[in-house]
Amino acid sequence: MLTTWNFKVRSTSHSSTTSVVSFDEVQQVNATAQKEFIRVLDLDVQANTLYKDLDFGFAYTSFTFEVGRNTNFINAYFRTSEGERFSLDSIPSTDQPGSVRRSPFIIPNYTQRNFTFFSGEIQGKLRLYLFYAPPLKHTLSKKHGKASDACDKPELVRGVVWRSGLPEPSGQREKHAVAHNVVHHAASSNSNHDYMNVVRNIFLLHTQSNGWDDIGYNFVIAQDGTIFEGREHQEIDSTDNIKGAHFCGKNSNTMGVCMLGNFEETAPSSEALASLTHLLAWKCFKDDILPTGSSKHPTSTSPLLAHIAGHRDGCATACPGDSLYQVLPKVINDVDSMVKACKPASSEVQLGDDRDIVWYYSQTRNALELRFSAELEISDVQVVGLDGKRVAQTSVKPGATELSMGDLKTGMYHVLFETRDGRQYARKIWIGG
């Protein structure tokens, strides 16, 4: 049987002052005038109890619970004033280092003024972190996450834009050379489409609760493909080369990219994956990082870590979620193709002698016919669109001097030839009538 309780809590504000608050005495806070960004409340709760419409005197836009290390959130849930329900037990215990365990970071669709939750198996002490990110009206451009050329840096929402009205980042930034790009998920709501608000609340979690100088990631990608600039670079270097706080204390030489959403529960959108691929291809091309490669991290005696890796590859965590982690191999292959397509367009790679590599397009066979010198020892041929996406690939048998690649649509392509000793040739060709 459910029971509804009113009780007293110990309330700790961001200024570290402490007081005991009775729910019968607090007055509603006017959210438009509220200046605090965080309030921390220590609660004593009973198991299997419904706490309904509690008023903490603090409007909030996000929250997280913290309990003892061995406490479970089984059956516990939170319900907004609009009736939206959030489970509090969707983060694996392996993602909870230290002596405490946290619930998922909940970001409701609207500012909340009351609090309703069911305790499930939680019994005893519970710490509640409430965060308030002042509403920010800003229309995101449709072009964010896009660029005319796959080799160019994608469009970003600058930090100075999305941080407006929030505390300034603190501390000094550290520049480093990136060898590993680490992909995360936020383990937050999949239904909140105010992506600016989500990023603002993550910033508050990292700075006001975790005690970090800034948001931990170098970049954040929303479900619609919008890319947000993460950690403030302070004009030391560009954001991609600033050391973050995202990889379990092994952040040197890494760039952190966080995908908004919880990918234990759902699959990432095609728009988000396209932006992730573009961002990683730009970074790998710019800094000459081999997308399909790996190297030791964090020291020369450490195990190998892929140059494009999931958070779980180097830390005891389920991040970036099974659904995102399963598609990372395809992301890596797409990034590799995009980087190869960038090279002939941007780095003046010699394209090979016309007498060594000859091509023509057969309209009757709808196929690209290739002829090349046996001395080149071609081992692999790829056809890549100008958007960096590979549309065809085939291996070449030793000694072969011709090849036919069919079912190609009309358009401009890069044809990439790789030899058995690692040399590369590229040609930009038009296929069609």
Image: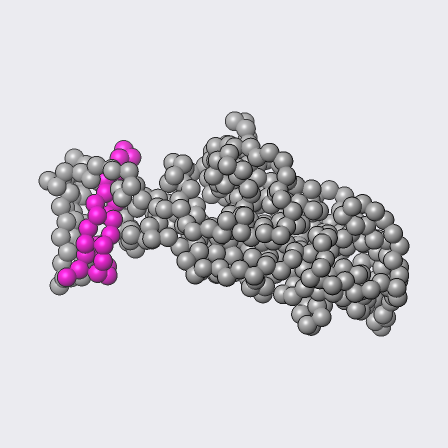
Range drawn in magenta: 404-433
Up/down of 324 relative to 286, above or below: below
| Residue 325 in sight | no
Q: Which image quarter is the C terminus in?
A: bottom left
Residue 421 located within the stretch drawn in magenta: yes
- 366 or 160, which lies in front? 160
Up/down of 275 relative to 239, above or below: below
Up/down of 90 relative to 231, above or below: below
Furthest residue toward front: 33
- 56 or 185, which lies in front? 56
Q: Main secondary structure of the magenta part?
A: strand
Q: Which image quarter is the N terminus in?
A: bottom right
The residue shown at (35%, 49%) is 150
- Measured as percent of width and height from the top left, residue 313 is found at 55, 43
The image's colour scheme reads: one colour
94 left or right of 350 in image: right
The residue shown at (15%, 43%) is 357
- Measured as percent of width and height from the top left, residue 44 is found at 86, 56
The residue shown at (53%, 44%) is 218
Up/down of 282 relative to 304, above or below: below
| Residue 218 in sight | yes
70 left or right of 173 in image: right
The residue shown at (43%, 54%) is 145
